């Protein structure tokens, strides 16, 4: 049995274990920093993706060149003045609080060395304030003034991507952008086989690669545990994987990943899993929501997704299992399994995503309740639709029902004549996802144009729409609705299946600008007529 010190897969501190992969990133940075060309870079990776290991290896390789002085700052101070003191101490010079950039430039020039390189690891805390972000840009100014004498590489997590996306950081707009993704299958095989000369069969390599998504820390921790358990190591891998997942990943690493993904990333992980197949490039907006590219990169650098041949697919089965256990999808948690029942089957065939499923199911539940308890919606006098309470009653009733779910619900006008959709519903996990709803009473002003109105109110962010028509007559509403309301739609549309479903009774698909079709669910809420 190997001792702890002999174990080549050690994970007790960053950079302790074997270094596998990252050859392209390492070579690119070494060339740039030695030549002084494009020698400012930002490396992004999630927890355990190997940022610190890359920084340590980069320091090691650059230090072999006597013309380059390399300084790795592993724990940068949060306060800018303290960070400047760290940098100047590394350079053997005194800090100048009044002119820190000039002091840095002077210190580098006075050293008599061809090139100085600063490697700054874990910059999240430093850039968490406006002062810290300004400091990052001051480093860029010093780099520009020194024109090749200074190289700078910062290493951080998704906060770097957020700063880049915010367009407020000249440093990141100047720097070479380098995201770290999970190891490839061949790199994972090398990590398993090379350090101890293990003959790991290809099928076992693929199993561990799928289970970990090629995440360096996860793979290394499993291998470390297998070696601790002793030979025969291959027979220990499955036990090691489950022990490490339960004892280490489930309580520390996975919760950190989940929190760092934030609501948008969490929603995208769930959407990927529900999609059930790789998301092709042309499907990304439809499946993942508007502007998915930055968040796809966050998912990749966390290790929970991967782009292969242009298609995006979920990775790290261990993490998916943890999500199912600790953060089940709201539909499943509420006992309204989307795959169960006629409505669930319809939504499944239509390929509806979680937000769409949840909203349509919520509206269907409200419609059934309204029909089952009609007295709440009727006045004391009149006949037919004259007994129906005003349109605002049904709008507010539906709005109240939707507010009971995990949605952000907005009311617009409530029949005030301002020409906007009656209700807007947003996904609480991803506010970019939105749907609009239009509610009408049969025979009231504009009821024939209800579908046309709904289509006119949608915006590009709307993923689908719902039309609710309320009626109290002695004849099937669906027949006259198709004739008078759907028949009034000028643009072409396709009627999708909804047989055997009372709510919605009809589902249509309409083409719109940009090539992204809009699905419309038609809920025909027909209360009992006078003769029933």
Image (cartoon, grey):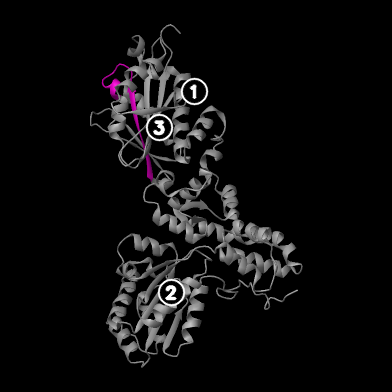
SS state under label 1: loop
SS state under label 2: helix
Are circles 1 and 3 on residues that touch, CB within 8 Å? no
- Left or right of 468? Residue 186 is right
- Quarter of the image with the N terminus is bottom right
Q: Position of residue 435 (x, y in %)?
A: 37, 37
Is 438 within the magenta?
yes
Label 3: few (<14), some (14–19) or many (≥20) C-alpha neighbours in 10 Å: few
Q: Position of residue 301 (x, y in %)?
A: 48, 61
Q: Is residue 98 above or below residue 225?
A: below
Viewer-nearest residue: 473 or 17:
17
Residue, far left: 418
In this rendering, the label closer to the viewer, 1 or 3: 1
Marks 1/3: CA–CA distance: 28 Å
Is 486 within the magenta?
no
Residue 272 visible (yes or no):
yes
- Left or right of 303? Residue 419 is left
Q: Earlier in the sequence, mark 1 or mark 2?
A: 2
SS state under label 3: helix
Q: What is the quadrant of residue 254 in the picture?
A: bottom right
Q: Is residue 186 above or below residue 2?
A: above
Look at 34% across and 60% down and name the residue there. Answer: 165
Which residue corresponds to mark 1? Answer: 499
In this rendering, the label closer to the viewer, 2 or 3: 2
Which residue corresponds to mark 3? Answer: 400
Boundaries of the magenta span = 432-449
Which residue corresponds to mark 2? Answer: 28
Q: What is the quadrant of residue 70 in the picture?
A: bottom left
């Amino acid at each position: 049995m190997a001792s702890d010190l002999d174990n080549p897969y050690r994970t007790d501190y960053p950079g302790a274990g074997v270094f596998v992969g990252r050859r392209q990133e390492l070579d690119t940075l070494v060339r740039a920093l030695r030549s002084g060309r494009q020698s400012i870079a930002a490396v992004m990776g999630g927890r355990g993706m190997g940022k610190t290991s890359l920084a340590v290896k980069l320091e090691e390789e650059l230090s072999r060149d006597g013309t380059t002085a390399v300084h790795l700052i592993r724990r940068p101070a949060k306060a800018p003045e303290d960070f400047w003191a760290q940098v100047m101490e590394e350079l053997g010079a005194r800090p100048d609080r009044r002119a820190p950039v000039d002091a840095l430039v002077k210190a580098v020039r006075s050293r008599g060395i061809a090139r100085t390189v600063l490697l700054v690891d874990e910059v999240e805390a430093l850039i968490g304030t406006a002062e810290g972000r300004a400091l990052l840009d001051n480093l860029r100014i010093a780099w520009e003034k020194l024109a090749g004498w200074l190289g700078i590489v910062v290493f951080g997590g998704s906060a770097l991507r957020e700063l880049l996306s915010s367009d407020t950081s000249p440093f990141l707009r100047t720097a070479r952008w380098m995201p770290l993704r999970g190891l490839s299958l061949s790199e994972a095989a090398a990590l398993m086989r090379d350090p101890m000369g293990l003959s790991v069969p290809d099928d076992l390599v693929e199993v561990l690669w799928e289970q970990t998504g090629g995440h360096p820390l996860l793979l290394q921790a499993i291998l470390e545990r297998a070696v601790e358990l002793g030979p025969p190591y291959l027979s220990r891998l499955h036990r090691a994987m489950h022990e490490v997942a339960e004892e280490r990943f489930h309580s520390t690493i996975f919760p950190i990943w989940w929190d760092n993904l934030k609501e948008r990333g969490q929603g995208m992980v769930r959407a990927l899993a529900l999609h059930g197949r790789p998301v092709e490039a042309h499907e990304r907006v439809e499946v993942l929501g508007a502007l998915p590219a930055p968040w796809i990169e966050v998912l990749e650098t966390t290790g929970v997704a991967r782009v292969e041949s242009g298609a995006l697919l979920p990775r790290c089965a261990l993490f998916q299992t943890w999500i199912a256990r600790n953060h089940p999808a709201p539909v499943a948690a509420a006992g309204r399994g989307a795959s169960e029942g006629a409505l669930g089957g319809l939504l499944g065939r239509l390929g509806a995503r979680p937000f769409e499923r949840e909203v349509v199911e919520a509206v269907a539940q409200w419609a059934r309740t309204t029909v089952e308890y009609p007295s709440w919606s009727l006045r004391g006098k009149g006949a037919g639709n004259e007994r129906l309470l005003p349109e605002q009653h049904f709008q507010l009733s539906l709005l109240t029902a939707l507010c009971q779910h995990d949605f952000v619900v907005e009311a617009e006008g409530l029949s005030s004549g301002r020409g906007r959709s009656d209700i807007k519903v947003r996904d609480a996990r991803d506010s970019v996802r939105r749907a609009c709803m239009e509610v009408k009473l049969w025979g009231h002003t504009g009821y024939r144009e209800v579908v046309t109105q709904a289509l006119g109110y949608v915006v590009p962010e709307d993923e689908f729409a719902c039309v609710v028509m309320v009626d109290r007559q002695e004849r099937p509403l669906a027949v006259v609705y198709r004739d008078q309301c759907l028949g009034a739609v000028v643009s072409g549309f396709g009627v999708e299946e909804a047989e055997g479903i009372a709510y919605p009774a009809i589902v249509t698909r309409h083409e719109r600008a940009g090539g992204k079709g809009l699905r419309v669910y038609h809920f025909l809420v027909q209360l009992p007529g006078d003769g029933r």
